[in-house]
Amino acid sequence: MAIEKTLVLIKPDGRKRRITGLAIDKLEATGLELVAARVVRVTEKLAQEHYKEHAAQPFFNAIVRYLAGETHAIEHGRLLAMVWEGEDAIAAVRRAAGATDPEKAAPGTIRGCFGRKCAGLMENVVHASSNPSDAAREIALWFSPSDIA
């Protein structure tokens, strides 16, 4: 087992619905340590860079707009970006987050409790890095090394 860092984003819909603290409670229950956090106003360019591995997918523009807060009257796409650290942090956070599709997420997970589908768009509240290379790239996109305690 390895000590890892991973990125978690509480997306604009989660902030708008005021469930940020509830999601953090579930992350803290994993035993991981929060080592960086900041509220970010997401631009379309930042959202495109974050999701660049999906650029060829038909859903790319929709997820960029969602992360930038341009859907469902979520104004000014502010999200909470966080870095969590600990033993097998990537897997631990992904277990706490639940399946990407809220309808398939286990009860008690962040997405199982708070995710929803609204007007055909999946609002799954959080982003969680999927593997060590994605985590490293994503953390560097949202934080500088001096931001991480």
Image (cartoon, rainbow, N blue to C red):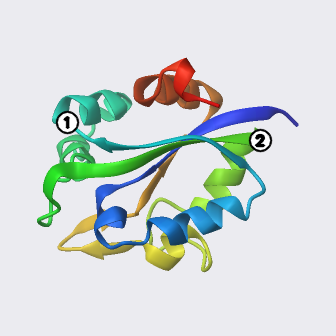
Q: Secondary structure at mark 1?
A: loop
The alpha-carbon separation of the residues under discs 1 and 2 comes to 30 Å
Q: Secondary structure at mark 2?
A: strand
Q: Are marks 1 and 2 in contact (CB under 8 Å)?
A: no
The answer to whether residue 13 is visible is yes
Q: Looking at the picture, how far across and down is residue 136, in whole percent?
A: 57, 24
Q: Looking at the picture, how far across and down is residue 75, in whole percent?
A: 14, 57
Residue type at mark 2: give it: Gly
Q: Looking at the picture, how far across and down is residue 111, in whole percent?
A: 49, 68
Q: Which residue is mark 1?
A: 43
Position above or below: 53 against 23: above
Residue type at mark 1: give it: Thr
Position above or below: 18 against 63: below
Give the residue at x 11% y 65%: 73
The answer to whether residue 56 is visible is no
Front one among 60 and 85: 85
Q: Which residue is mark 2?
A: 86
Position above or below: 97 against 113: above
